[in-house]
């Protein structure tokens, strides 16, 4: 891994740059660039702060395109996304301020007003080492966290998930598979960096996390929205970003982009095996190719809503034994994850019925 390049991209991410913007600006051109960007996305705060200065060599070690983008020279694709044209004087000033802010070495908030103080994921328990996909599925069915030896084995386990659940049902067994129990050393899969708190050190339960879809509360703004399925659910994602966040003071921007699926991190600690098994099926794979489908993510690369679609994309990505070459469409909210969770919880509770466990 080119750690200087990882630092460059981490610095750009902390400044608000997205994958699409960096591609458009010419900063991402090669497969190596994509891999370094994916690595930077796993923990941009850490990489922007902790890579030794001796390895970085200062800003002059950046590619010309990335340096121009961050320091305000040339066209700013981020500004284009909102103005439809080249950078204005105000846009140039904003880019320069963004670059200066990159140098301040600030970390994202470690506490949520709604969920409490964040628990350091480094202190979470380790998984049981397994040697075969079947062994992994059996351990997960028992509720144990497992550690797969490679991306290929993780893919094999996911591909067998549907049959495993069906066979257990035939035998009269009820199995509860949580795909978050699968971990792969050297990656952020699947939920090793999910949001945990002092109250919930193994991960905040899904029922306590915000959901941007559900049954609307009668009389709410969401109740006026079209239903997305026969159960009467609505999607409040756009309402959250375009009505709620956009009207905060200062307003919070949201931009659509396309990023490697494996570069994102799960915020919740539960992924339903049955749903992931469907995503891995032939019909589910077709669902993943819907060009209109997007998931919501925070500025620091955490998924807010759309975990199962993401898991399906990651499953596809794992098929060749490596990660980083399957992209997913996202709406990137310009807030760190702990702040987004508070905002989404505040908003969702006034619009949709609470989820049951």
Image (cartoon, rainbow, N blue to C red):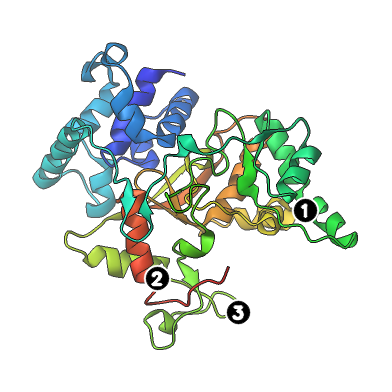
Of the two numbered discs 1 and 2 on the same chain, state the one appearing first in sequence: 1
Locate residue 281 relative to residue 46 in the image: left or right. right
Q: Quadrant of the C terminus?
A: bottom right
Q: Which mark is residue 231?
A: 3
Task: Name the spot of residue 123 as percent of width and height, x first.
Answer: 47, 36
Task: Name the spot of residue 52 as percent of width and height, x first.
Answer: 30, 16
Q: Residue furthest front?
A: 199
Residue at x 38%, y 83% (from the top left corner): 220
Q: CA distance from mark 1 to mark 2?
A: 32 Å
Locate residue 131 relative to residue 96 in the image: left or right. right
Locate residue 136 relative to residue 74 in the image: left or right. right
Residue at x 15%, y 45% (from the top left corner): 91
User: What residue is disc 1 on?
Assistant: 162
- Decide which of 254, 204 is in the foreground and name it: 204
Q: CA distance from mark 1 to mark 3?
A: 24 Å
Tag 2's secondary structure?
helix
Of the two numbered discs 1 and 3 on the same chain, state the one appearing first in sequence: 1
- Decide which of 198, 337 is in the foreground and name it: 198
Q: Residues within 10 Å of mark 1 (few under 14, many from 20)?
A: some
Counting every numbered tag in the picture gives: 3
Q: Residue furthest right?
A: 171
Task: Name the spot of residue 136 as percent of width and height, x first.
Answer: 74, 40
Pointer 2 with pointer 3, Cβ within 8 A: no
Is 285 drawn above or below residue 225 in the view shown? above
User: What residue is disc 2 on?
Assistant: 348
Is 313 drawn above or below residue 284 in the view shown? above
Tag 1's secondary structure?
helix
């Amino acid at each position: 891994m080119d750690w200087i390049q990882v630092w460059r991209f981490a610095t750009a991410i902390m400044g608000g740059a997205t994958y699409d913007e960096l591609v458009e600006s010419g900063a991402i051109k090669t497969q190596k660039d994509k891999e370094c960007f994916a690595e930077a996305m796993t923990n941009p705060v850490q990489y922007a702060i902790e890579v030794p200065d001796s390895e970085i060599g200062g800003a002059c070690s950046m590619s010309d395109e990335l340096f121009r983008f961050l320091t305000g020279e040339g066209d700013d694709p981020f500004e284009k996304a909102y103005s439809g044209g080249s950078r204005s004087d105000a846009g140039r000033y904003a880019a320069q301020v963004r670059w200066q802010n990159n140098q301040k070495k600030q970390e994202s908030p470690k506490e949520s007003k709604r969920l409490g103080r964040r628990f350091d994921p480094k202190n979470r328990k380790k998984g049981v080492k397994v040697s075969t996909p079947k062994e992994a599925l059996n351990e997960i069915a028992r509720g144990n966290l497992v550690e797969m030896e490679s991306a290929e084995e993780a893919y094999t386990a996911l591909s067998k998930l549907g049959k495993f659940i069906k066979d257990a049902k035939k035998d009269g067994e009820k199995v509860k598979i949580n795909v978050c129990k699968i971990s792969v050393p050297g990656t952020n899969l699947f939920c090793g960096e999910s949001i945990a708190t002092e109250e919930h050190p193994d991960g905040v339960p899904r029922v306590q996390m915000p959901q941007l879809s559900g049954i609307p509360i009668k009389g709410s703004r969401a109740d006026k929205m079209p239903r997305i399925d026969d159960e009467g659910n609505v999607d409040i994602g756009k309402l959250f970003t375009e009505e709620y966040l956009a009207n905060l003071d200062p307003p919070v921007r949201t931009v659509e982009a396309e990023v490697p699926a494996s570069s994102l991190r799960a915020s919740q600690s539960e992924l339903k095996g049955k749903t992931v098994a469907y995503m891995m099926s032939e019909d589910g794979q077709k669902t993943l190719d819907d060009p209109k489908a997007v998931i919501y993510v925070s500025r620091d690369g955490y998924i807010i809503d759309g975990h199962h679609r993401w898991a399906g994309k990651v499953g596809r990505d794992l098929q060749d034994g490596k990660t980083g070459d399957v992209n997913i469409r996202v709406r990137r909210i310009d807030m760190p994850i702990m702040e987004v969770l508070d905002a989404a919880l505040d908003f969702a509770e006034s619009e949709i019925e609470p989820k049951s466990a």
